[in-house]
Amino acid sequence: MKARGVFIIIIILLAAILIGGGIWAYFKFIAPKAETEKEVLPAVRVTEAIRGSIADIIQTNGEVVSASSVETYADVRGILARLYVELGDYVRVSQVIAEVDPSQPGLTYALSPVRARVSGTITSLPFDRGDAVNTQMSIATIGDLSRLQAVAAIPELYISRIRVGIPADIHLEAWPEHTISAGVNEISPVVDPASRTLRMKMNIPRGESRAKAGMYAKIILVIEEKKDVVKIPADAVLRRLGDVFVFVIEDDTAVRKPVVLGISQGGIVEVMEGVEAGEDVVVEGQSLLEDAAEVRVLQELQAVS
């Protein structure tokens, strides 16, 4: 009877050992393998291709200047003895704005007046009293501040895309939220050989009291604008061996689709062929994908507006 009890205890211990070993083997080998197989699927983030407007733009910097200005010169060489005006003063034609002393050692002459050649506002005074001047140096610049222009230099690379009449948005640093709508009305016929740029001008509409001569301006030129086109993030586009394509998710599968691109603006690109509005395009995790690969979608982003 006692031997039978010992035998039962041994059987129970063996069963416990087998069950424990099975549980250990499951968590050691089977469960990690299943978890590993689950994690093998590439994780991606997607965004929906949408329809909307897009514009091809060029952004450059410039300054606000008087549309017309006249340089004023002295009639004689000498020392700038008197200066009767300051920056911003309004002067009338023939008004004396300065006097030059042409005296030489041992000889004394009367002061020679410098007169305004036109009526307008003093926009530049490069010299101070006591400076030496001559007949080739501008004593003052007089401008018509009722007519202002934004002037900018366009890099030679973009010359073929610029033409008279294209729209331009002008932003002033002092009022960054305010946009002045204008258009290119003058383009220089020659390229500056030193800077390799082309100078262009845009008239600022009358009544724009915020604009002041001498201000810094950020200028956005709208080269082309399209409406009702399919748009996706430019980061979604891949290029390999001359092919241009994106990955679109269909039933948790990444499908490689060749695309034909159009206008690009601010990280968004037009898709002319290859993707339809409403399709989910991979924007993160696509660099290592292959066609028909199963994926795990982590998140759908709102990357295009």
Image (tube, grey):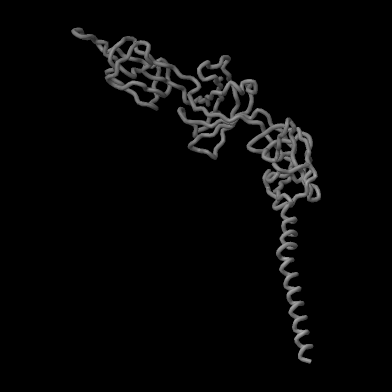
The structure residue drawn at horizontal position 54% and vertical position 32%, both measured from the top left corner, is 218
Q: Position of residue 213 (x, y in %)?
A: 46, 28
State left or right for residue 68 relative to residue 256.
left
Residue 154 vs residue 92: left or right?
A: right
With respect to residue 273, does 106 lie above or below?
Answer: above
x and y, in percent, of residue 186 in the image: 58, 20
Quarter of the image for residue 4 reads bottom right
Give how far across and how far down residue 290 sits, in percent. 76, 42
Q: Where is residue 193 in the image (x, y as percent from the top left)?
A: 53, 15
Residue closest to the far bottom: 1
Extreme residue toward the top, this view? 107
Residue projecting furthest to the front: 3
- Up the image or down, 215 lies above or below 196; here it is below
Q: Please report the residue visible at 28 percent of the width from the left and 15 percent of the height from the top.
A: 79
Number of numbered discs on residues: 0
- Front residue of 8 and 90: 8
The C terminus, quarter of image: top right
Q: Residue at x 52, y 24 (%)?
A: 151
**Residue 132 occupies quadrant:** top left
